[in-house]
Amino acid sequence: MKRLDYPFTKDAIRELKVGDMVLITGKLFTGRDAVHKRLHDGAESPVNFENQIIYHCGPVVLEKGNDEYEVKAAGPTTSIREEPYQWEVMRDHGILGVIGKGGMGPKTLKGCQDYGCVYFHAIGGAAQVLAEKIKSVDSVNWRELGSPEAIWELSVEEFPVVVTMDSHGNSLHKEVQSSSESKLKDLI
């Protein structure tokens, strides 16, 4: 098990390889479809994503009042929807990591290699367990997009993920697809 502690650095990210299990402690920013589309279309980001990690997640957040929040569920959402935008968001905003589920495609893999990023897989179906790793909500931006689509700044402790695309061009998703296609050909 490896640790990735805030502040995140490109050197620490480049040390990670496909298959590494990682515990992240520090800051994560959520961002789903609407955030990626806005950033892709050139909107000025309300947060500095430089050397940060974006989490494909629409958390379930309880508003306690006085700008205090509690995250009740924070499972990953399917990442492939961000494939048209992700590599450009990495490039234009200096993102070092992306967390989601299901993997991403060749544009994102190339972006990981070109810009020194990794794609982390979080466990789907474990939204409440992952929420327990969130220690605070530090800000919320673009709230007008709706709670699941807003940018939530989260402080996390030992948030568990697996590297499935690394900055060296390796992809567990690509390997699984190739292996599956080969076995399918044998069966047909």
Image (cartoon, rainbow, N blue to C red):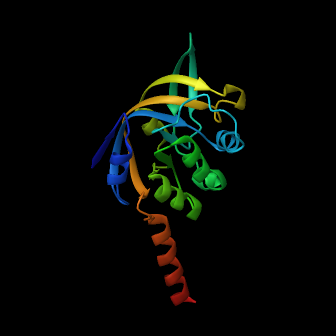
Q: Which residue occupies 72% across, 43% down?
A: 41
Image coordinates of residue 19 in percent, x first then y, are 35, 59
How many marks are shown on the rendered structure?
A: 0
The image shows residue 168, relative to residue 150, as above or below, that is below
Q: Which residue occupies 59% across, 38% down?
A: 58
Image coordinates of residue 135 in percent, x first then y, are 41, 26
User: From this viewpoint, which residue is outermost toward the top?
Assistant: 66
Q: Which residue occupies 53% across, 31% down?
A: 48
Figure quadrant of residue 16:
bottom left
Residue placed most toward the observer, 19 or 72: 19
Residue placed most toward the observer, 134 or 113: 113
| Residue 12 at least partly seen | yes
User: From this viewpoint, which residue is outermost toward the left?
Assistant: 1
Quadrant position of the C terminus in the picture = bottom right
The image shows residue 168, relative to residue 137, as above or below, that is below
The image shows residue 101, relative to residue 141, as above or below, that is below
Residue placed most toward the observer, 27 or 74: 27
Q: Which residue occupies 37% across, 34% down?
A: 7
Image coordinates of residue 11 in percent, x first then y, are 34, 47
The image shows residue 181, relative to residue 142, as above or below, that is below
| Residue 103 at least partly seen | no
